[in-house]
Amino acid sequence: MCDKRMRLGFVGLTVLAVGLQVGLGQARFDMQIKTVVVVDANGVPVPDARVYQGECLVWDSRMRTVCLTEESPWQRTDAEGAFSFEFVRQGAGRPFFVTDASFEQMACFHISRRDPNESYTVRLSEPARITGTIKSKDVPLSGVHVTLSYLVRGRALYPLLSAEEDFEAPVHEMSLDLLCPAGCDLSLQIEAGGLGAKPHHKDQMIAPLKPGQVLEIGAIEFRPVSGYKAFGGPAPELQVGEWVKGKPVTLAELRGKVVLLDFWGLWCGPCRKAMPKLVELHKKHARRGLVIIAVHDASQSKASLLDAGQDSVDLSTVPFRVAVDAAPQEGDQSLLAGRGRTIDAYGVTGFPTLILVDKDGLAHPVRRIEALESLFGGRSTSRPITLFGRPTPDDRSLFVEIGVAVGLIVVLVLVLGVLWFRRSRFEERES
């Protein structure tokens, strides 16, 4: 088995090396000189226009405006408003951002890898603006990160702008006002920083804007992470209506142990699916001090959970404590009103929610059950792992995989070295 894998590895490496040699030889014939002429809105060539690749715009938090990075531009146009460069047609294409010296006109354009044209005209125009409001009702924001990307063919994203706003004191609302190029598809992504705030907001696709247009995207509101009320502080004490399995206990009595709270519901499919993983976790680490308490919302009772007629979860196989949350108080205004007092105290907004209470009684979020293995010096899987994430039958097999990987890395380094040398020679000829 190992000899077969060795032969396959060497054959694959040989094929890759030959393919790269052929590709490099073909790339010599796919090298093309592209010439781009930059003109203003009236068609007049723009000398000393600045050309950038990749992220080139930043947010100046002091001036509260968008400006260029301090890095030098990749190219500048000559007196005729033109610039030329060597283009490898086998690449994935190139995106460009262009602005005049005053930063009052700008544009984006893209040259695809199979574009046969040798010359292009790029017309600059007045930039557009994107405005809106970022809000967080329940959790104050300590910072906001905004990424604006150039979207090509609805898929490829090329970052243009990185806007970072850190607040001296947490806020619940901030205004957004971004300068951006007109006439191209854009993607806007916003991330909020703050204890308990959900870290990501889904991308918002923005159709090409007209020069000078102001796009009002309205209010973007961040919702809190489930359990946000407890994070960073002492875990609220449990308020149990009924203990379904195990002896009654308080978090104060469990101080010095690691407690995992599982907020779940019988009606919740992911909750039921996670139960066997919790059982396995208990069996592996209960002796090391792990205590698991599954807290069901107040919609059920001990009798209904133990009812032989319900076949959703067989609690007879569950070795850890199970409790039903206490009924909520009258006039409760929490995000999940009516689900239970402990749920309200922790700020649980979705099921299942896992919260870890450390030995000092402090609450921490848990995204995945597998992540808990590291707390006890284990891995997220009981199988041995190799470089490629597969079980190894013996050390020789692992050696083969590492050897193939090192060989591929060496070939990649050689290819990059050749490409760098060719580019250096081209830049020397230009200078």
Image: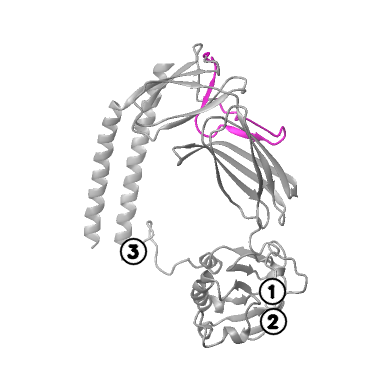
Closer to the eye: label 2 or 3: 2
Residue at screen point 51% across, 77% down = 279
Is the Cβ of the residue at disc 2 closer than 8 Å to that at disc 3? no
The dot on residue 392 is: 3
Say what secondary structure mark 1 lies in: loop
Nearer to us in this view, 42 or 60: 42
Q: Quadrant of residue 29?
A: top left
Residue behind mark 1? 340
Nearer to us in this view, 386 or 268: 268
Q: CA distance from mark 2 to mark 1?
A: 9 Å
- For this view, does 51 lie left or right of residue 64? left
Q: Badge 2, how many Cα within 10 Å: few under 14, some, many 20+?
A: many
Q: CA distance from mark 2 to mark 3?
A: 50 Å
Residue 86: % across, % down = 38, 23
Say what secondary structure mark 2 lies in: strand
Residue at screen point 52% across, 15% down = 43
The span picked out in magenta is: 44-72
* Image quarter hosting the N terminus: bottom left
Q: Badge 3, how many Cα within 10 Å: few under 14, some, many 20+?
A: some
Q: Quadrant of residue 55?
A: top right
